[in-house]
Amino acid sequence: MSWAAHDLEPYAFQRHLVLKIAFVPLLLGSYAPDLMTKWFVYGITVFGVKLKADDPVQFHRGWPGFGFTHSLLFGVVMCLLFWKVFGSKIWGVSFLIGQWAHSLTDTGDTVGTMLLFPWTFHFHVGAWAYAGQTGRMTDAAAYFSGLGSMWDLVWILYGFYAWRVLTTEYFDKYIFPADRSWAWANRMLPRMGLVTLYRAAFFYGTCRWIAWTIWAHVIHHYPYDLSWGGPGWVPAAHP
Amino acid sequence: MNTLLVYLGAAVVYIVVGVLWVDFMLSVIVAAGYLIVAAWLVPSALRRLR
């Protein structure tokens, strides 16, 4: 799994797909595969009751489980839903791009994704360890010690290289007119508030990459291991 | 330039709080709310006070 790439990739796509996509569904698509599952992978305590998947890897990426949310087919189904049921082609296509980007990015870890679901084969590059089954903190420490963290850094640097997509001028010229939902939101929030919201995911992805890196290596001294499939000190899950 | 400084300041605070209390940086919704306050509402209020 990736920790910051899903926040940052939409800005890179936005730079290259000017006018053809709507940013909000693009971001929603980028978050969608993990939206309803991550909390149950790591586990939460509600009124003293611990809720956690018995097999987090199977639940998150497998079948039976919610692994289909990381498939190309899920993106197509959601695209058709937005397009044919809710009547917005641009929302459908934008969601599709974001969701496909997430599904492809997550093939980078050792578990990978069932890209061609209902075929349940897990496509995986295995560049960094999937460690969601170890809990949130160990997963964070492992992710920010391995190549996954470097992959996120690529997207941060690319975001700064494409800094113009974050400007007010760019928002006014391309983002706002491409999607009517901004005009709807503009009834409640002034333009500068909308620009701030538009920048939020980039701010979030970049800041938490820095914060988790400091947490893992300055506060807790977890060792970096940029070897393929690493870090070696965490038990990596496999499909 | 002023905008950039405001965002940099907001980022520094977010990172420091996040490192000390990691729950703060688990949600993009919280981050968006924080950014609205730190990079838009507070600077706007300060501009009006001047």
Image (cartoon, rainbow, N blue to C red):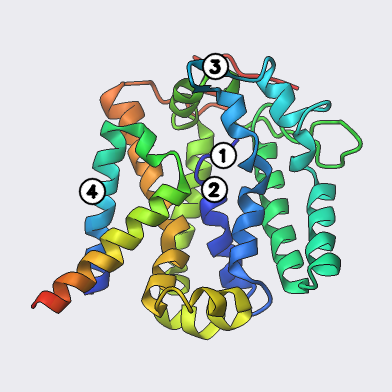
Q: Secondary structure at mark 2?
A: helix
Marks 1, 4 in one chain: no
Marks 2, 4 in one chain: no
Question: In this figure, which residue is indicated by the disc labeled 4?
Answer: B13
Horizontal arrangement in the rendering, residue A132 relative to residue A66 (left or right): left
Disc on the earlier residue, 1 or 3: 1
Distance from label 1 to label 3 (Cα)? 25 Å
Return the residue found at the far right: A119
Question: In this figure, which residue is indicated by the disc labeled 2?
Answer: A5
The picture quadrant where one finds residue A132 is: top right
Q: Position of residue A101 (x, y in %)?
A: 68, 52
The image's mark for residue A50 is 3
Horizontal arrangement in the rendering, residue B46 relative to residue B36 (left or right): left
Return the residue found at the far left: B50
* Amino acid type of the residue tagged 3 in the rendering: Lys
Badges 2 and 4: C-beta atoms under 8 Å apart? no
In this rendering, the answer to whether A203 lies above or below A132 is below
Quarter placement of the C terminus of chain A = top right
* Amino acid type of the residue tagged 2 in the rendering: Ala
Closer to viewer: mark 1 or mark 3: 3
Chain letter of the residue beneath label 1 in the structure image: A
Badges 2 and 1: C-beta atoms under 8 Å apart? yes
Question: In this figure, which residue is indicated by the disc labeled 1?
Answer: A2
* Amino acid type of the residue tagged 4 in the rendering: Val
Residue located 66% across and 21% down the image: A56
- For the question of whether residue A217 can be seen, the reply is yes
Distance from label 2 to label 4 (Cα)? 22 Å
